Image (cartoon, rainbow, N blue to C red):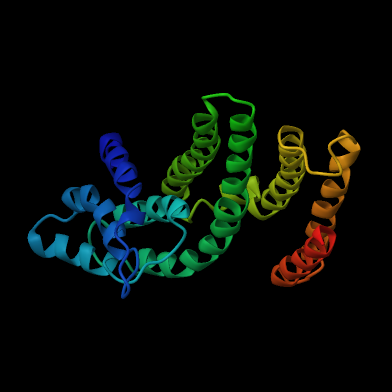
Amino acid sequence: MRTIDLVKIFFRSLSIGSSFNFSHMQNIGFAYSLIPLVKRLGGDRKGAAQILERHIQFFNSHPYMAGPIIGSVVKLEENCKGGDCPEAVKLKKNLMSPYAAMGDPFFWGALKPLSLIVGVIIAIKGLILAPLVSIMIYNSVHIWVRLKGFVEGYRDGRGAIDFLKTINMPNISRKIRWVSVFLLSLLTTVILAVRPVPGVEDLGFFGSLPVLVAIIVCSWAIGKGVSPLTILYGSSVVFLLIAI
């Protein structure tokens, strides 16, 4: 494949999340990403139709984790030279679910909350660039994973497994969550400093300390398997009693 074709495929892959459907999920976006490949390898209309037909089938993964899969499919299809390519279909089916299981907790459950918390802290301090900072934190990571994953996927034809092992997303997700807990406690301290709560406005930092302890305890309880819904209702009861 020419470099320009790979660039076109990568940019097309960025739109994979914009074409969901209930029956085949992200299949249209996946096939759309491969059109430069089809034009290069498809030959006549029959050959092009065969490539599109096998990649218009069901596909559903985390959209940011589709890059390594698409890159690998391009490599495998290139090796098959437009003929039958069961290896590419098998790779898609084998990797889409595990990659979704890695991407959802990392991007939705860890990175996005962290970037939003940082943005809110900066906004409370009155800096107009707060939304831009939040967007830059999130997009710089997710675009890097998509681009690097696509490149490594095309290079090894195995879904960029070595690259994903190197960054160890599950471990990073846990660390990001703890950083988010710390920043959330800092955010709470900032809010209390801006809008004092009756009874603690004269206590300074020590008035905010119980909030920090409560957040850490709740995070610890979730790690021990306590239902977040139980913690939510329990906290509501405690705060209601304090208010009374």
Vertical comparison of 147 with 46: above or below? above
* Closer to the camera in the image, 188 or 39: 188
Considering every residue shown, the one lying at the far front of the view is 244
The percent position of residue 128, horizontal first and vertical second, equals: 52, 24
Residue at 87% x, 33% y: name it: 204
Vertical comparison of 10 with 122: above or below? below
Residue at 67% x, 55% y: name it: 170
The percent position of residue 242, horizontal first and vertical second, equals: 84, 59
Vertical comparison of 66 with 98: above or below? above
**Left or right placement of residue 42 versus residue 195 in this view:** left
Answer whether residue 157 is visible to the viewer in this image.
Answer: no
Q: In which quarter of the image is residue 183?
A: top right
Q: Quadrant of the N terminus?
A: top left
* Closer to the camera in the image, 81 or 170: 170
Q: In which quarter of the image is the C terminus?
A: bottom right
The percent position of residue 185, horizontal first and vertical second, equals: 77, 43
**Left or right placement of residue 135 versus residue 166 in this view:** left
* Closer to the camera in the image, 200 or 148: 200
Answer whether residue 115 is visible to the viewer in this image.
Answer: yes
Considering every residue shown, the one lying at the far bottom of the view is 23
The percent position of residue 111, horizontal first and vertical second, equals: 60, 46
* Closer to the camera in the image, 29 or 19: 19
Q: How many marks?
A: 0
Residue at 30% x, 68% y: name it: 21
